[in-house]
Image: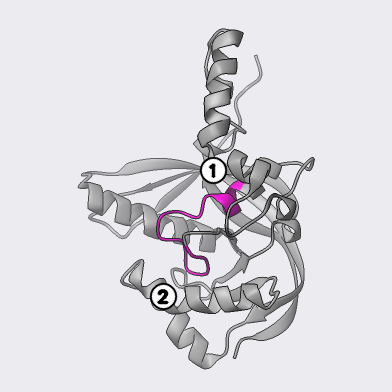
Amino acid sequence: MAHPEEIDYRATHRLIPTRFTSASVLETLPLPAETLSDLSELDAATNERKVGERRGNSAIGPLELVYAIPEAHIVNSAFTHPGPHGGRFNDSRRGAWYAGQELETSIREVAFHKRRFLRDAHFEGRQRFDYAEMLADFAGRFHALDGEERANCLKPDPVPQCYAASQALANSLLAAGSSGVVYPSVRHKGGSCIACFRPALVHNPHRGKVYGISMSEESEGIDTSEIPPPVAA
């Protein structure tokens, strides 16, 4: 059975698409204030994060989310936008905060899923995707996997079918009050990952650098470049 392990991880790396770094995409639209107000009401009624912050859902309540801290909207989004199939250690009802101890681990993890997207969408040639780095600290007792659980929960494919055992384990740990899981990266040999189950345990979330990650469906190669911040006018 997974066993608790005391950890103290500093400045772990999570990469998110740059388009999701604003509290709302409406902030970037050059529209009249009245129009923006109307659109904001519609956004608030349909945005999963905003709905979760107001009244929660069947798997996470508003009192579990975080407020009035830097990057609260990004932290809350990780838990209220679980995706249609969930992730390795979360199902489609409730998200988790995934991060790598190493930047390269996070790059490899997101590149794997983006390459699957390119393959499924039949994109040809190299494509570049921009990601913002979110740094966060984690301390306390998290669960480490034993040998049998690693074999069952860290299968590389097929996705998402290979998540069945790990999602079942995560749900049982979550119900037992677990903070989350630490585990070896499936996509980066030697890398280490964390899946945090509790928004309040994502400590000191703050922005790092912005990276452009280039790849193609045909090649396994990944090119990563740091994108400098815009020059102030």
180 horizontally vs 214: left or right: right
152 horizontally vs 21: left or right: left
Determine which quarter of the picture holds residue 34: top right
At a point 58% along the width and 31% down the height, the residue shown is 44
Q: What colouring does the structure picture have?
A: one colour
Q: Secondary structure at mark 2?
A: helix
Give the position of the C terminus as an image quadrant: top right
At a point 34% along the width and 71% down the height, the residue shown is 161
Q: Main secondary structure of the magenta part?
A: loop
At a point 61% along the width and 31% down the height, the residue shown is 229
223 horizontally vs 141: left or right: left
Rendered image: mark on residue 9? none
Q: Which residues are magenta?
A: 77-91
Q: Report the amino acid beneath label 2.
A: Ala
Answer yes or no: is residue 53 visible. yes
At a point 65% along the width and 49% down the height, the residue shown is 75
Q: Nearer the viewer, mark 2 or mark 1?
A: 1
Dot 2 or dot 1, earlier in sequence: 1
Question: How far separated are the C-alphas under marks 2 and 1?
Answer: 24 Å
Give the position of the N terminus as an image quadrant: bottom right
Q: Say above or below: 130 vs 151.
A: above
Residue 197 magenta: no
Horizontal and vertical percent position of residue 57: 58, 52
Q: Report the amino acid beneath label 1.
A: Glu
Q: Secondary structure at mark 1?
A: helix
Horizontal and vertical percent position of residue 204: 77, 52
Q: Say above or below: 49 vs 112.
A: above
Residue 89 magenta: yes
Residue annotated with mark 1: 48
Residue annotated with mark 2: 164
